[in-house]
Image (tube, rainbow, N blue to C red):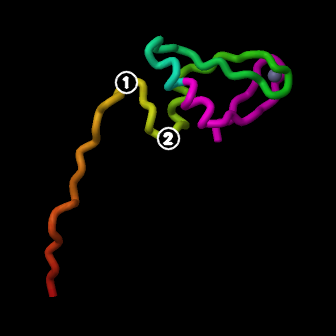
Amino acid sequence: MLNVKCFHCGKSFALNEDVVAAWLEEHKEERPKHYPAQCHFCRRVIKLSIEQVSRHLPARGNLDSAGEEIGQDGQGSQDEET
Ligand SMILES: [Zn+2]
């Protein structure tokens, strides 16, 4: 979970990572600097830096490495020694 503190009302709430990830995916071409999170309590929008929120997300929708593949290794044969 991604916990943020609202600076309007001072309460903390958790953001849904799936929602954030979906938003980032949707807006990735705009390369936003901030994610507008709505406070669960006062309903006001607080801007969170993308860097800050993306650190908490699973590494699937990384803005800077879209389409980049991670090399796989360890698929070779295993030597068994007795
Ligand atoms: Zn609030």
Which residue is drawn at the image coordinates 85% and 26% (left, top)? 41
Which residue is drawn at the image coordinates 70% and 17% (left, top)? 46
Q: Determine the image quadrant of residue 11.
A: top right
Q: Determine the image quadrant of residue 6.
A: top right
Which residue is drawn at the image coordinates 16% and 80% (left, top)? 80
Alpha-carbon span between mark 2 and mark 1: 14 Å
Q: Determine the image quadrant of residue 42.
A: top right
**Ligand 1 lies in quarter:** top right
Asked whether the beta carbons under mark 2 and mark 1 sit within 8 Å of each other, the answer is: no
The secondary element bearing badge 2 is classed as: loop
Left or right of 53: which side holds 10?
right
Q: Position of residue 81 (x, y in %)?
A: 14, 82
The residue singled out by tag 2 in the image is 58
Crowding at dot 1, Cα within 10 Å, few <14 / some 14-19 / many 20+, comes out as: few
The secondary element bearing badge 1 is classed as: loop
Residue placed most toward the observer, 26 or 59: 26
Left or right of 9: which side holds 77?
left
Q: Position of residue 67 (x, y in %)?
A: 32, 30
Rendered view: 17 above or below 27 = below
Which residue is drawn at the image coordinates 51% and 18% (left, top)? 27
Rendered view: 58 above or below 7 = below
Residue placed most toward the observer, 32 or 27: 27
Amino acid under disc 1: Asp
Q: Position of residue 19 (x, y in %)?
A: 62, 32
Location of the C terminus (image quadrant): bottom left
Crowding at dot 2, Cα within 10 Å, few <14 / some 14-19 / many 20+, comes out as: few
The residue singled out by tag 1 in the image is 64
What segment carries the magenta color? 1-23
Q: Position of residue 32 (x, y in %)?
A: 51, 14
The answer to whether residue 78 is magenta is no
Amino acid under disc 2: Pro
